[in-house]
Image: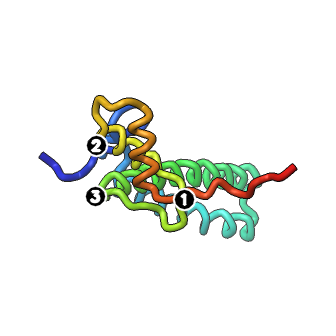
Amino acid sequence: MSSVRAVPYRGEDLDAERGPGLGCFRFQLVVLIFFVVLTPIGVTLGWPDWLTAAMLFTIIILLFFTGQTMIFLMRLVAADRRGRRRPVAGTTPTVGQIEDASADAGASTGEDVAANVAEASGPQDDGPTVRQ
């Protein structure tokens, strides 16, 4: 059994085998850099306008796909992390803490779960009071 915790994404666990890999990302970057360098050279050499415009649109499309691949790869890195970390400035319980408290409570009532979450997250500041 793996010690890596599954990360849910759109209702199912995120699978590293279903999606672009690092090789695909590197290829996209090489093609993107090629067009980013070639497009201004084509403009300065007076290549046809339709060709430089096509290269510009290719750059925009490649930026989109490269960005999406980067987001997917960052999700894989997040899925590989072990354990839960609490945000430094967080004053309210995180979703993970709420899930852990409800899992620990088992068949407890909702009030018990809320008490466990409040106990785990520490004192809460309700904000300023309004006087009338």
Query: Residue 10: where, in percent of width, then height?
Result: 44, 33
Whether residue 55 sits left or right of residue 31 in the image: it is: right
Residue 33 in sight here: yes
Circle 2: residue type: Glu
SS at mark 2 in the image: loop
Under circle 1, the secondary element is: loop
Q: Residue beneath label 1, please? A: 91
Marks 3 and 1 sit apart, C-alpha to C-alpha, by 23 Å
Could you tell me residue 15's position as x and y percent?
30, 41
Identify the mark nearer the N-term, 3 or 2: 2
Q: Position of residue 107 (x, y in %)?
A: 29, 29
- Give the Cα distance between marks 2 and 1: 37 Å
Q: Which residue is mark 3?
A: 82
Residue at the spot x=34%, y=51% of the render?
79
Task: Look at the picture and state if 24 lies above or below 114.
Answer: below
Residue at left 38%, top 55%? 78
Residue assigned mark 2: 17
Could you tell me which secondary element the residue under label 3 belongs to? Answer: loop
Marks 3, 2: nearer the viewer: 3
Q: Residue at x 42, y 32 (%)?
A: 110
- Residue 23 shows up from this direction: no
Q: Name the N-terminal-most of marks 2 and 1.
A: 2
